[in-house]
Amino acid sequence: MNKKWVYDFEEGNEQMRSLLGGKGAGLSEMTRIGLPVPQGFTITTEACKDYQVSQTMSEEIKNETLEHLKKLELMTAKNLGDATNPLLVSVRSGASISMPGMMDTILNLGLNDDTVKGLASLTKNERFAYDSYRRFIQMFSDVVMGIPRSEFEDILDKHKEAGELKQDTELTAEVLLKVINDYKQLYLRHIGKEFPQDPMEQLFSSIEAVFRSWNNPRAITYRILNKISDDLGTAVSIVMMVFGNMGNDSATGVAFTRSPSTGEKKIYGEYLTNAQGEDVVAGIRTPKPISELETEMIETYHELLNVSELLEQHYKDMQDMEFTIEKGKLYMLQTRSGKRTAQAAVKVAVGMVNELLISKEDAVLRVTPEQIDQLLHKMIDPSVKTSPIAKGLPASPGAASGKVVFDVKEAAARGKEGEAVILVRPETTPEDLEGMAYSQGILTSRGGMTAHAAVVARGMGKPCIVGAEEIKLDLLNKSFSVNGVTIKENEIITIDGSLGSVMVGELPMVEPGLTPELKELLKFADELRELGVKANANTPSEATRAREYGAEGIGLCRTERMFLDPNRLPIMQEMIIAETKEERVNLLKQLEVVQKDDFYGILKAMDGYPVIIRLLDPPLHEFLPQRERLEQELEELKAKSSDPLLIDKKVKELRRSKELSEFNPMIGFRGCRVGLVYPEIYEMQVGAIIDASIELIKQGFDPKPEIMLPLIGHVNEMKILRDKVENVIKEKLSQANVQLHYLIGTMIEVPRAALTADQIAQYADFFSFGTNDLTQTTFAYSRDDAEATFLPFYLKEKIVAQDPFMTIDREGVGKLLRMGVVLGRKSNPKLEIGICGEHGGDPDSIEFFHYAGLDYVSCSPFRVPIARLVAAQVTIREKVNKQ
């Protein structure tokens, strides 16, 4: 049986999305359920893949396309190229995964010097006919032949200036004829031949151009940014033209069944009367809000409301619709799941559960980890009084500050270097994608809420303001002025994409809290997930934030951070250079007082939840000044004949620094090795933990400390240190006469610990995988050195598929982790096992940890909501796969 390359809209449906692309599948599905859709057919993504091999359409695909064209001509009683009754079509791209604005579309195909007269006669509207023809010449020349669109815009602007006109709609038929002639002359100069008059040449050239657009730079960049496969290809839909530019009873627009910015359940969108679709998204004219359609065309408006409700009920998701109104009749040109902000994604998902449209499982799967991350974006501190210099449309929420940059390529280059920039443009186009991706925010002087800048910024989660018409841009001199204020390139501004406000300078920001809808969504997630979620926190304020974000305990409290306080560091340094145990113990007693306060605050903040406290881990020399600095200070002190006692202290610090100096401190004298050689350090810390717990118990709280011994690699290290820790705990509890639930465990962060986990587990109540160090020791990579030298090269050349410090290396580090889990539980079935490295907040890694059998993940407080969501998503997908 021969392969089928082309499908009429009546033959397709939504389930054929991979073959028909999103647009083709949507048109077919809307046709199937009886909505008003122009007739047409779709050339499949398989045809696109076939084209990419030889860069030509095969005769087989061309012939099948012609067969469906003949059927379309019969159904419409029009013929392509007929001078008296011409069929006109649009050629539209559409991949299976939505890529708005990334590929190309051609409208009004079939017009030439003869058919334009037939169109004028049929419609009795010369102006409409010639306006459609000039649009077709411009789009064909741009999309198919690569002539810059701006050169056509310049011609149009000159004719408008000559007639002192402001809007394209004011151009008369006579002026449009002159525009068409100038357009054709421009085409001749660029291409060296006349504009094509043969509709078949127009058609197949356009189809091939859309196939080629799959690999245009902006489409490739979009796929990279959104992790979309290069192998999908785009379908091409050939659709009978319906016209929104036939007068004031015609219009074109874009609408969403709910607000894509906030998720509010209300139709939202924009339209233009007497216009074609490109006018709405290109920002050439400022569109009207969809609500105004009710006053202009009340019956059509209510029909659109009914279609909107039907589509949302049918797809059970917020829809993004394109429509055209021709002489009062509504036509639907596209429907797809609407791109939305993080705020809207959560509100829509929760709202649809409450409306009984979708299940809790569906709602959890609808929201991505990236959207949760975006929801926790910064906002301007509400206590700060702002003085906006300009206002525009609030296209994408959040706030950002940065240096003003007008050039897209410069914004991309500077953004890649880590510089905070705000991209300021008249409007953006799909070619501007990279510059937008590397900017902190986007500000445009033109366009509406469905303009390119708005749609793309919402998808990226970047603050964006569009249609700030008060702003006068001077791109030549790289500045803009508004209300008497001039802002030059590199000056800092702040934009608030939630309010549409532009402010001079950098304003203080605050982190947002959890919205009621997000709390409800995460409650759904908690009901569904199996993996626990804890937080890494080192202070009471971090612990409090972790609880607010839903953490079920502290998976890692790093005690070394506490010693870096300026009031404590000198004591710590004195302890390190002490020459006798007695000196060290006396200094540790001073530190024990403040350590107890530290632990008291954290245990109190997490009352009733477990708190894993890691005893001192880094090498001791890290607390001393750098050797070069000490040598310099010593020379200066001696030269000035300074205090002998101070000189003596510096001499001791330098000597101790040299004694503790190591070639590779990461695998040197640190962690449990310090605790074994200087047991008084760990004894002090354990004593402080237990004293803090005892005080809390007496005050009516429920502390649950868990003591972590770092860098264990041998069972004897674990055995000896556990005995020492338990001796301190038992003595403290006996003296206080209180009962305390506590655990003693270790961080598995060296390969030998994973390989001998069965031995170590006999003396451990819990394991926590320290995947940062486990990755370093498994790969023999020093993280900082690798990221500064060879790792970027490895990633670029695909020597490694992904950064192993960002996403767990399943085949190496992951194998050790699985081995540690199996061996540990074999000898200690009650062993609690989690992970506390940076991987604990990475979605891909969380999936692996679920299947590896861990009890929990621990991550930074701000990643806790993401981990809660992803843990639930993994559980849901696992159950679906088992069905």
Image: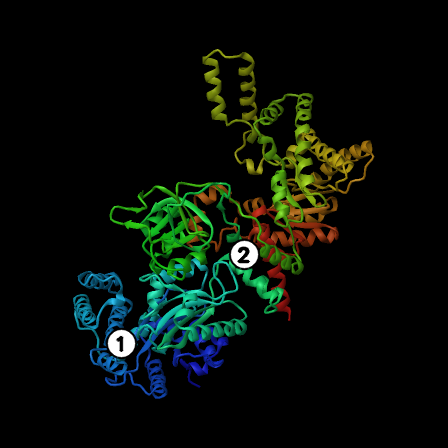
Residue contact between numbered discs 1 and 2, judged by CB atoms under 8 Å? no
Mark 1 → mark 2, Cα distance in angstroms? 44 Å
Question: Which label was assigned to residue 775?
Answer: none
Q: Is residue 745 above or below residue 212?
A: above
Name the spot of residue 168 as percent of width and height, x first.
Answer: 26, 65
Query: Along the line of sight, which residue is nearer the eye, 693 or 574?
Result: 693
Name the spot of residue 1 as percent of width and height, x first.
Answer: 44, 86
Query: Along the line of sight, which residue is nearer the eye, 561 or 288?
Result: 288
Residue name at image x 55 percent, y 27 percent: 624
> Disc 2 on helix, strand or loop?
helix
Q: Is residue 747 above or below residue 80?
A: above
Residue name at image x 65 percent, y 61 percent: 528
Name the spot of residue 342 as percent of width and height, x first.
Answer: 51, 57
Single out the residue that lies furthest toward the top. Answer: 641
Residue ID for mark 2:
369
Q: Quadrant of the C terminus?
A: bottom right
Query: Horizontally, is 872 left or right of 436 in the view?
Result: right
**Amino acid on which disc 2 is placed:** Pro
Question: Which label was assigned to residue 202?
Answer: 1
Q: Earlier in the sequence, mark 1 or mark 2?
A: 1
